[in-house]
Image: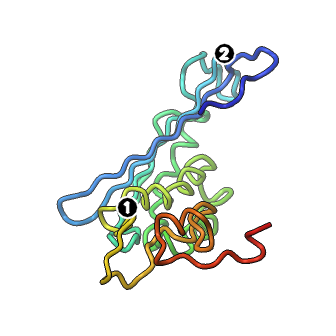
Amino acid sequence: MPLSSSHPRRVLKHTRAIQVQAFARDDGLWDIDAHISDIKTRDTKLGSGVRAAGTPLHDLWLRITIDTQLTVVAAEAVSDAVPYPGFCDTIGAAYGKLVGLNLMKGFRRGVTERLAGIAGCTHLTELALVLPTAAIQAFAGEVIDTRDGAQDDAQQRKPFQLDRCHALRSDGAAVAQYYPRWALKPSAESKS
């Protein structure tokens, strides 16, 4: 379903694109490659000069390598287009500070503590913050057993995805329908 029609008439001025791809490696690790670009539809005056319309202001890449416990074992960042060449594009090595963080255990807080403000690039740091949910999507059904609709009597643990979003709350209708074994009676709060 698309968004509602916009009123009044509008004109595209800026596009930010974020793409994340996950790759299973033959050594058992996973690479999560993330890319962010910013492109304006008009010439843009910067302190470093004019950036022509359609030319990326930002074209940045971040790769983390993770194990199956979602711990970062390697990280690198590169900048193909930046507003201040020779300055913005010198921060890539700082993203090695992501090594040791776990995507499911305080990752976003750790990224902010290690790379916020002048310790990193605003755009690369922002890009890093989308990696946990992208990795979970990549792992779902491959590394993390989501057991969608499974009624296996041997199943002892609640499926990973339950209670991680509003639709899959244990006291909600979706869990009652698709995961009845794990359904809880709706609380008074959830009825209102």
Residue 154: name its quadrant. Answer: bottom left
Q: Is residue 95 above or below residue 101?
A: above
Name the residue nearer the viewer: 151 or 107.
151
Which x, y percent locates residue 30?
A: 31, 60
**Residue type of the residue flagged with mark 2:** Arg
Q: Secondary structure at mark 1?
A: loop
Of the numbered discs in the image, which one, if any, rests on residue 91?
A: none
CA gap, disc 1 to disc 2?
Answer: 41 Å
Q: Residue at x 37, y 85 (%)?
A: 156
Name the residue nearer the viewer: 156 or 122.
156
**Residue type of the residue flagged with mark 1:** Ala
Q: Residue at x 73, y 70 (%)?
A: 190
Which x, y percent locates residue 31?
A: 33, 56
Q: Quadrant of the N terminus?
A: top right
Q: Quadrant of the C terminus?
A: bottom right
Question: Which residue has dot 2 on it?
Answer: 42
Drawn side of residue 5 relative to residue 106, left or right: right
Which x, y percent locates residue 77?
A: 44, 50
Drawn side of residue 9 relative to residue 133, left or right: right
Q: Earlier in the sequence, mark 1 or mark 2?
A: 2
Q: Residues within 10 Å of mark 1 (few under 14, many from 20)?
A: some
Residue 45: name its quadrant. Answer: top right
Q: How many marks?
A: 2
Q: Residue at x 63, y 23 (%)?
A: 40
Drawn side of residue 160 relative to residue 112, left or right: left
Q: Secondary structure at mark 2?
A: loop
Q: Is residue 53 above or below residue 113?
A: above
Furthest-left residue in view?
26
Q: Residue at x 58, y 32 (%)?
A: 38
Question: Which residue has dot 1 on it?
Answer: 140
